[in-house]
Image: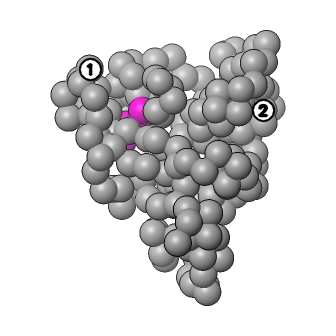
Amino acid sequence: MSFISGFFRKLFSRNTQPVSENVNAPGVDACFAHHTEFVIGADPVASPFTPEILEVLGDILASPLGARIVRHVVRSGTRIPIALSEGPDVAFSVIEKTLYYTTDLAGYLASREHNIAHTLGTLMAHSLGYVIENLEGMTIPEEGVHVTRHCENVYREYKDMPLRCTYLAPGDVC
């Protein structure tokens, strides 16, 4: 079975459970390749998805942003690599086409200046915007603003969360 036919079989299976009840929702395994960075700075090693990231990625795929992710995966024929990072320094960064993340949001947010409420979902949606745009070969002036508006805010609106007006301005809520 080819990657694309297997992808569509998995994506459009007859599973009708909501994402929150079925964290391994169709599409998550087909769209993302999970790794773990066991030693900071070392190459990440393939690993199973954690339940927390499965739920978040399933939720993102169910959002309007998910259609863009699926289109990218189908066009490219490759899954988006993500890696659980052991430290906050590279979390929510894209390094060599791999999106690094952490589930220690308190530690990550304490090491940064954030002026708006974030969840693992909003941080992943924002970071996935960079991955998609980089993999699609897009070069956009003020990329952070573009990703905020066209990726993160799409997910925020889906979750009924306040939207961000800018990229790094204080009180960054519309």
**Residue numbers of the magenta segment:** 100-105
Q: Residue at x 59, y 38 (%)?
A: 128
**Spatial distance from mark 2 to mark 1, Cα to Cα?**
31 Å
* Residue 114 drawn above or below residue 34: above
Q: Compared with residue 128, is residue 134 higher up or lower down, i.e. above or below?
A: above
Mark 2 and 1 residues: CB-CB less than 8 Å, in contact?
no
Q: Is residue 62 above or below residue 165?
A: below
Report whether 85 appears left or right of 124.
Answer: left
**Where is residue 147, by image quadrant?**
top right
Where is residue 131 shown, x and y percent of the image?
60, 33
Q: Earlier in the sequence, mark 2 or mark 1?
A: 1
Horizontally, is 32 left or right of 115 in the view? Answer: left
- Tell which tag, 2 or 1, sits nearer the viewer: 1
Label 1 crowd (10 A; few <14 / some 14-19 / many >=20): few
| Tag 1 residue | 41
The amino acid on which the numbered mark 2 sits, given as a three-letter code, is: Arg
Where residue 50 appears, as percent x and y from the top left, is 33, 56
Q: Is residue 20 left or right of residue 139?
A: left
Which of 164/31 is in front?
31
Residue 133: x, y in percent?
69, 31
Label at residue 169: none
Is residue 172 visible in the rendered image? The answer is no
Give the residue at x 29% y 46%: 46
Q: Which residue is pictured at 75% across the width and 18% down the height? A: 139
Q: Secondary structure at mark 1?
A: loop
| Residue that mark 2 sits on | 149
Mark 1: amino acid: Gly
Q: Position of residue 59 (x, y in %)?
A: 58, 59
